[in-house]
């Protein structure tokens, strides 16, 4: 055989093996294989294929299971589990059944077709065999092993038949219904919302098997839907008895030992500023005048680490949760109320233990001295934000002089941040007034005013200097392991997409140096204030940013333009702050303790994941309340702004209440509309009418689906 023919046979053999690797469970004849491996190979080289198949069968690469039909030999299926064509990653499952695998080892996601997911589900950690890369095509693969299930519990609507039932999961990433045998229905009735646990997924079954573990009730009821959101996001609600018992045993009095080495701030003017409906007050400010242009301002944070000892049941539970969860109608705390609402709440006229950062600072925000200390404080006054804002605006009221000075300093701190490249988000928060049954009766907006910004600036300053103390390298001082709050620069692709979009709205963004980018963001955020596209642009700005997270490896905080940043100021509701308190105290007290990097990096990763879980639950509760708020407004007309476009519809945010719905493309009957993805618009094929992101529109409510939490709109 000539060298050229040998080369052709070798290439075809590789194509055939790659094809069977991609389809390991199916059988094919030579005609099907010829067609599958490409027109050129099939038409010009078909004479080789039959012989190659027989040779591969003799070599136990293939099995000729019926005359002329072949499939991959089991030994070669096993071989796929080895070598450099196998990666480990996480499943991002789509409702269509196809999936993508995300992994740190590759820059691109791996596409998995529905027939190659092998019963993996969203979030699972899996082993993936990579198919050969084809030119200009996305890398594809097959899931060959499920290493770890992300979850086995789902919420959904049960449909009961005579001898079995199916649960249709609420989770849009669940591509199949869950089969429930008759004995595992647990008295659930058709149409009820239930929690189901997957118990088994037989090899040849299309659906996983499960059992109903809890009947939540009828869809649409507030307690049922909130319970569903809590369950769907694996949020822990009730504290175990041993944790509550440990909390009950904590003393509410202080011994001499408790006060050893604590600085006494009980005679220094101290106050808290929180939302009017807050139940816990975990930070306070103290004020003392040194001279006309120098002041001692203390940032006092509840000393949670005094009560929650490492390794205790309270500590284990706090770590497991890692954060408090803030839903529309309730707070699910990280710590039992005994701590969060009592012992660690800096109530007025009560002695409380704190961990404090004390600054000597002048009116322009220049820090001349700072120190860290365990303290005992006594708050003189509990302010709501609204009270302080009134004092600032009317220039009179209790502690006006002190608040005025602190506010002046805060404004200088904010200006300095802006000048250094910090991105200033002044986003309006949407809130609901609820009736006694949790039903939203009105919407109101929380705007960040000077009173909010005053507290924010001093919390940011405290977090920054704590991180600087631990992270800055100093001569003769060894590097300290620490927990940082990090924020990477925006992804260039996302940044370019954002720049392209805002340019179509008449705004410009520079994508060169870090400072240029942040200055551009601030300019745009300032220019959109009061305009119809404000909320849209602010939302897209947030989406363009990388996600902040916790890490022992410091890369700085891009959004704040800080080289060093951490979370120190909320240990009642964030576990990383509790870790920071313990580490900082160890360092300032001269302890010889060594912290393990791998252990703390693992804790940072867990805390970051739990933070995302809490955010998902919060967003889900907001979406539910928005749908519920619009439920009785069918037919009403609203002004809105186009907030998104897809091939299925046009998303519109209603100006009056910031609720979002979708105008299905099929309801636009005046033309045939198609998606122009590059220009963020849909266009009428015949008349050329455009609906573009950011455009003002008038819409009416046509339908509200409470089960899916979706609102359908019609263009007026």
Image (tube, helix red, strand yellow):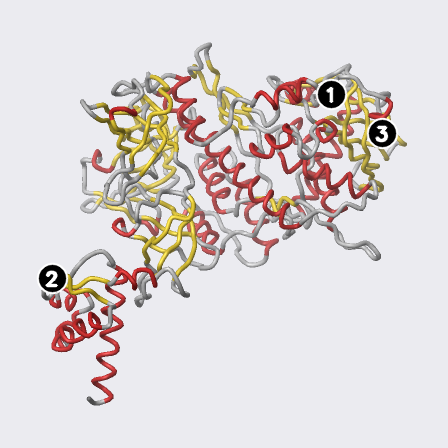
Q: Residue 175: x percent and y percent?
A: 29, 40
Q: Is residue 672 above or below residue 379?
A: below
Viewer-side residue, 418 vs 255:
255
Q: Residue at x 47, y 39 (%)?
A: 539
The residue that label 3 is drawn on is: 262
Q: Residue 275: x percent and y percent?
A: 62, 21
- Gap in Å between the C-alphas at discs 2 and 3? 84 Å
User: Which tag, 3 or 1, sits closer to the chain's start?
Assistant: 3
Q: Which residue is outermost to the left?
A: 67
Label 2 Cα crowd, 10 Å radius (few <14 / some 14-19 / many 20+): few
> Mark on residue 324?
none
User: Which tag, 2 or 3, sits closer to the chain's start?
Assistant: 2
Q: Residue 394: x percent and y percent?
A: 70, 19
Q: In the rendered view, does 613 fall on the left or right side of 701?
A: right
Dots 1 and 2: beta carbons under 8 Å? no
Of circles 2 and 3, which is in front? 2
In which quadrant will I find the C terminus? top left
Q: Quadrant of residue 277?
A: top right
Q: In the rendered view, does 459 fall on the left or right side of 120?
A: right
User: Which tag, 1 or 2, sits closer to the chain's start?
Assistant: 2
Dots 2 and 3: beta carbons under 8 Å? no
Of circles 1 and 2, which is in front? 2
Identify the element where label 2 is drawn: strand
Identify the element where label 1 is drawn: loop
Res. 701 visible in picture: no
Q: In the rendered view, does 484 fall on the left or right side of 628?
A: right
The residue that label 1 is drawn on is: 395
Q: Is residue 359 above or below residue 215?
A: below
> Mark on residue 66?
2
In which quadrant will I find the N terminus? bottom left
Identify the element where label 3 is drawn: loop
């Amino acid at each position: 055989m000539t060298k050229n023919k040998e080369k052709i046979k070798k290439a075809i053999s590789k194509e055939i093996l790659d094809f069977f690797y991609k389809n390991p469970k199916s059988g094919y004849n030579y005609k099907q294989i010829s067609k599958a491996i490409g027109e050129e190979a099939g038409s010009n080289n078909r004479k080789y294929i039959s012989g190659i198949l027989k040779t591969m069968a003799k070599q136990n690469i293939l099995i000729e299971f019926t005359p002329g039909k072949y499939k991959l030999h089991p030994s070669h299926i096993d071989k796929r589990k080895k070598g450099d064509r196998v990666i480990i990653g996480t499943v991002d499952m789509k409702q269509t059944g196809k999936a993508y695998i995300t992994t740190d080892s590759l820059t691109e996601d791996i596409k998995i077709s529905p027939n190659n997911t092998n019963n993996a589900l969203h979030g699972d950690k899996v082993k993936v065999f990579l198919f050969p890369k084809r030119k200009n095509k996305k890398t594809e693969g097959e899931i060959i092993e499920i290493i770890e299930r992300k979850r086995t519990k789902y919420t959904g609507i049960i449909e009961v038949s005579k001898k079995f039932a199916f649960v249709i999961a609420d989770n849009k990433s669940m591509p199949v219904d869950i089969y429930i045998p008759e004995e595992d229905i647990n008295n659930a009735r058709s149409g009820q919302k239930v929690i189901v646990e997957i118990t088994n997924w037989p090899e040849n079954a299309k659906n996983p098997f499960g059992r109903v573990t809890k009947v939540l009730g009828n869809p649409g009821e507030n307690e049922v839907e909130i319970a569903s959101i809590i369950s769907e996001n694996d949020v822990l609600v009730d504290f175990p008895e041993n944790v509550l018992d440990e909390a009950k045993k904590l003393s509410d009095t202080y011994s001499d030992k408790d006060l050893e080495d604590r600085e006494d701030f009980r005679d220094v003017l101290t106050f808290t500023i929180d939302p009017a409906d807050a139940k816990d007050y975990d930070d306070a400010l103290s004020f003392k005048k040194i001279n006309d242009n120098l002041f001692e301002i203390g940032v006092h944070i509840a000393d949670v680490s005094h009560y929650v000892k490492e390794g205790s049941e309270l500590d284990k539970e706090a770590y497991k949760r890692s954060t408090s969860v803030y839903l529309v109608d309730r707070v699910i705390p990280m710590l039992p109320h005994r701590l969060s609402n009592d012992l660690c709440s800096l109530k007025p006229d009560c002695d409380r233990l704190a961990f404090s950062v004390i600054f000597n600072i002048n009116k322009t925000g220049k820090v001349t001295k700072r120190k860290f200390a365990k303290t005992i404080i006594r708050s003189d006054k509990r302010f709501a934000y609204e009270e302080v804002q009134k004092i600032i605006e009317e220039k009179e009221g209790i502690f006006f002089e002190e608040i005025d000075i602190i506010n002046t300093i805060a404004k200088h701190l904010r200006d300095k941040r802006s000048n250094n490249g910090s991105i200033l988000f002044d986003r309006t928060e949407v809130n609901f007034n609820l009736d006694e049954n949790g039903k939203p009766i009105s919407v109101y907006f929380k705007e960040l005013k000077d009173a909010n910004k005053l507290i924010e600036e001093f919390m940011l300053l405290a977090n920054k200097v704590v991180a600087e103390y631990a992270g800055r390298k100093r001569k003769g001082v060894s590097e300290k392991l620490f927990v940082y709050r990090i924020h990477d620069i925006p992804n260039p692709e996302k940044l370019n997409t954002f720049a392209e979009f805002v340019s179509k709205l008449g705004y410009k963004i520079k994508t060169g140096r870090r400072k240029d980018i942040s200055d551009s963001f601030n300019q745009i955020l300032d220019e959109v204030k009061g305009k119809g596209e404000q909320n849209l642009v602010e939302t897209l700005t947030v989406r363009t940013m990388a996600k902040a997270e916790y890490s022992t490896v410091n890369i700085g905080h891009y959004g704040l333009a800080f080289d060093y940043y951490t979370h120190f100021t909320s240990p009642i509701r964030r576990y990383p702050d509790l870790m920071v308190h313990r580490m900082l105290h160890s360092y300032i007290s001269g302890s010889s303790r060594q912290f393990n990097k791998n252990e703390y990096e693992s804790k940072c990763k867990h805390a970051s994941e739990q933070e995302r879980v809490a955010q998902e639950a919060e967003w889900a509760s907001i979406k539910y309340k928005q749908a519920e708020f619009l439920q009785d407004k069918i037919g009403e007309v609203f002004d809105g702004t186009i907030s998104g476009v897809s091939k299925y519809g046009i998303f519109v945010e209603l100006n009056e209440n910031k609720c979002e719905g979708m105008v299905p493309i099929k309801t636009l009957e005046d033309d045939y509309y198609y998606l122009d993805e590059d220009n963020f618009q849909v266009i009428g094929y015949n008349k050329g009418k455009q609906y573009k992101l950011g455009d003002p529109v008038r819409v009416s409510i046509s339908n509200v689906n409470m089960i899916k939490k979706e609102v359908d709109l019609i263009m007026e």
